[in-house]
Image (tube, coloured by chain):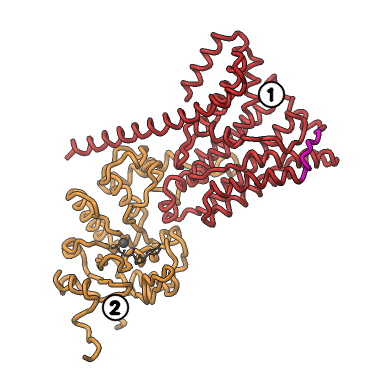
Chain colours: A orange, B red
Amino acid sequence: MSASLPTPLVEMRGISKSFGAVSALRHVSLSVLPGSVVGLVGDNAAGKSTLMKILAGAILPDSGSILIHGRPAVYDNPIGAREAGIEMIYQDFALVPELTVAQNIFLGREQVRRRWGGVRTLDTARMNRRARELFASLGLRVPSVTSPVQALSGGQQQAVAIARATGFEAELVIMDEPTANLGAPAIEKVRQTIEGLREKGVAVILISHRLEDIFAIGDRFVVMKRGEIVANREVGDTCSEEIVAMMVTGRDPRAEGPTA
Amino acid sequence: MFLVLALWIVILSLSSEHFLTATNLLNVARQAAPLIIIGVGMTFVMSTAGIDLSVGSTVALISVLAGSWLSAGLPAFVVLPLLLLVGALLGSLSGWVITLGVPAFVVTLAGLTSIRGLAFVYSDGYATPIVNPVMAWIGRGGILGVNAPFLIAMAVAVLGWFLLNRTRFGLHALATGGREEAARVMGLAINRIKIAVYALTGALAALGGIVISARLSNGSPNAGVMLELEVIAATVLGGTSLFGGRATIAGTVVGALLINFVRNGLNLLGVNPYWVQVVTGIILVLAVLVNTVLSRRVESWARATSEGDEGNAE
Ligand SMILES: Nc1ncnc2c1ncn2[C@@H]1O[C@H](COP(=O)(O)OP(=O)(O)OP(=O)(O)O)[C@@H](O)[C@H]1O
Ligand SMILES: [Mg+2]
């Protein structure tokens, strides 16, 4: 690596993780430059979600380290990762159906005020107001920030998950198959969101089976197979046939293979 | 539920002239007090999608400990906090085992049998009379004509309402019960929350045990038999979901009052007291039915309208 390269925003080094006998990740390394859009692709069970949950602090790795701006990250839970500027939109949105839109958006980082000499109470009015402002600024629409999430449609729930991940000055937003089960307008919304983030200099890791989306809005492909990284490719330097072939075979044709 | 309560009160006041007297109403409020006190704890447990079947047995153990410690001459201001602590510790123990992955139903069922067993072992099966001025006030005293048990219950309900609806703890308990995986990936301290709600319920079961023992003026290992079922009935009647995520303290208070108004009303009407148990069971099933069916209706209705809006805008 030459010294002239910019410091990566995030660097994962030698990450391994096993679930019992299943080895989900084997010595995986990945780096993301500030403001870049990385498409993370791979077959089912390749380990994409596991790798991203580790980055988001929701799972602890067995070994390996994470650097943020070149410095070791010290978090061991999702709150720590969020404070370090890493947000994740989960495959199932990770919303609590019974709570309101605003409660979901602020879940885990509620705004409180001190009353009666130190008792901390929820500042619901302020959170509702800020949630409304957030939706307005993102151009997303929900019926009301005080309605329970279970009363929303799938696309509206996705808007809530996007608002939660993008409304708090993140430097990196991870999206785990954000377009699965969504109609065309909602998919278009996700593309716009990612482009908006890129314009603000926010990096995005996008897990998706829709390669055309990554060709359209991404900078780089990272291909995984069976818990390992197969290849890194600039978007302009590859085609979908090559990516699909690498996802299936798990081999990088351009890398020098073992001498035959 | 509020409607049912109102209706029942109207029917009863028309059919019995003893029902709508201040004395009788306050009497019902006093009888409902332990149910309200423990029901507040149960509301928190259920908000996390848990259940606590051990509260009746905790009442019994607290009752015999109160009898024994007070008759040994320890002052009430030492004994009462200690009893609350015992309750909280028993609750945290259940909560801790539950966080290891054993279902709450199993853990607290084990608590139900073994804690009452402890109460019998400790007391040898005998009740101990309680003679103590503080306990006498809790059992028979009051302020401005309102009896002490009901005052205590109201104080607990107000604090419980505040904790559930105005603090992070209450919100996080609801989130844990609503969808645990979402709460976990948002970084909530799920295990701590679970241990805390069982500890709270244990402490409130102890407080309920103190009130019951004070009322009866003795510490008995037979106190609180089947109380867990009444507490659960009151909580569910009030509209708290058995499956977590939705909980209401006001509902629990109404549920507890309703159960006792039914009992009182049937008494006044001269119905055989054994029928009261039958009726309580039937009311419970009806309440759950109404709660789940109604709330499902409302949800699908809300979803239908919000999707309709979206469709219009496109
Ligand atoms: N909590 C868990 N417990 C046990 N095994 C797990 C767990 N999470 C993931 N795994 C296993 O780890 C492997 C990688 O799973 P992961 O979800 O990361 O794959 P993925 O690339 O996201 O797949 P998909 O495209 O289907 O979402 C799989 O074999 C999976 O069964
Ligand atoms: Mg996945």
Q: Nearer the viewer, residue A159 or A172?
A: A159
Tell me what residue is drawn at x 84 percent, y 38 percent. Answer: B71
- Chain that bears disc 1: B
Quarter containing ligand 1? bottom left
- Vertical placement of residue B267 versus B310, above or below: above
Tell me what residue is drawn at x 76 percent, y 42 percent. Answer: B65
Q: Nearer the viewer, residue B145 or B245?
A: B245
Residue B165: x and y in percent read 50, 38
Tell me what residue is drawn at x 44 percent, y 69 percent. Answer: A20
Q: Is residue A33 left or right of residue B260?
A: left
Q: Is residue B198 left or right of residue B243?
A: right
- Vertical placement of residue B184 versus B148, above or below: below
Residue A90 among magenta residues: no
Q: Could you tell me the amino acid type at mark 2?
A: Leu
Quarter of the picture holding the N terminus of chain A: bottom left
Residue of label 2:
A5
Residue A195: x and y in percent read 22, 58
